[in-house]
Structures are given as C-alpha cells and as structure tokens.
Amino acid sequence: MARSLDGLVLAPVADQAPGQVGTRTRFAYHEEDGRIWADYAGGDVVRGYLVGTREGDRLDFRYVQLKQDGTTSSGHCVSTVVELPDGRVRLEESWEWESQEGSGTSVVEQVTRHDG
C-alpha cells in the first residue's frame, strides 16, 4: 500500500473544464484510521471539501465546492493511490457530479516545496 496521505498537498496535472478544479487548485489531505478528508481552493474554486474512506490504495469520497461565481456543486469520486518512482504520491481519479451533469477522470500529484 502506498504511504499515508496525511499532511500531503496535491494538485491537478492538467486543467479540467472552465469553472472547475485546475492546476492552480491545491488539495490539503488528511488521513486517519481509514478516513480521509481534504480542503481545497485555487483557480475557479473559492473553497472545497472532500470526505471519505480509504481501503488499501482505493479512496471513495464525496466532494462539495463553492466557485468564484457563487455557485455550489457536489459529486462523488473514486481514486487509486499510486506511488511515483520519485517517492511522490499520485491519485488517479474517476469522478461524477451529483448536483449537475458531467463525469470524467483526472490526475492529481503531490506538490513539493519546489513546484508549488
């Protein structure tokens, strides 16, 4: 199993559609006893939160966010935790909005002091 996400900061490797999470968004993760949570902000997202569970290298969580235009949205995501050759963590994600139409995949990777 890849190492704990507790205390890690992750960022998307590519921008999603306009008005969504993008490369300027930062996720601050916490993990304890199979539970995960994070707060995130940046780009079009003023504030977002996610909460869920971890079993092995699989995360299952719900997220909710407030965007710059004042709208809110929520959804469900399942992620696989991958440890990169350089020791950083990557999450390979499949997500689906529950408050609106849309679904997709994304990748977020651990940010080091030098890149973010």
Image (spheres, rainbow, N blue to C red):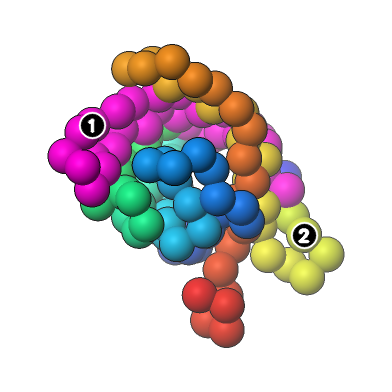
38 vs 11, nearest the viewer:
11
Residue 27 in the image: state x and y as whole percent: 43, 55
In front of the other: label 1 or label 2?
1
Secondary element at image label 2: loop
Residue depicted at x 59% and y 62%: 110
Residue stretch rendered in magenta on the structure: 53-82
The residue at the point 16 percent across, 39 percent down is: 70
Residue 72, which numbered label? 1
Q: Label 2 sits on what residue type? A: Leu
**Label 2 Cα neighbours within 10 Å, binned few <14 / some 14-19 / many ≥20:** few
In the image, is residue 71 part of the stretch drawn in magenta? Answer: yes
Which percent across, then down, holds residue 76? 45, 23
The outermost residue toward the bottom is 114
Task: For residue 2, say whether it is visible.
Answer: no
| Residue nearer the viewer, 22 or 116 | 22
Chief secondary structure of the magenta portion: strand
Which of the pair 70/31 is nearer the observer?
70
- Identify the residue at horizontal 50%, vertical 75% (top origin): 116
- The front one of 111 and 99 is 99
Q: Residue at the right extreme?
A: 85
Q: Residues within 10 Å of mark 1 (few under 14, many from 20)?
A: some
Comes first in the chain, label 1 or label 2: 1
Q: Secondary structure at mark 1?
A: strand
Asked whether residue 74 is drawn in magenta, I would say: yes
Give me the residue at 57% from left, 77% from top: 115
Locate residue 103 relative to residue 72 in the image: left or right. Answer: right
Residue at mark 2: 84
What amino acid does circle 1 point to? Thr
Q: Is residue 30 left or right of residue 90?
A: left
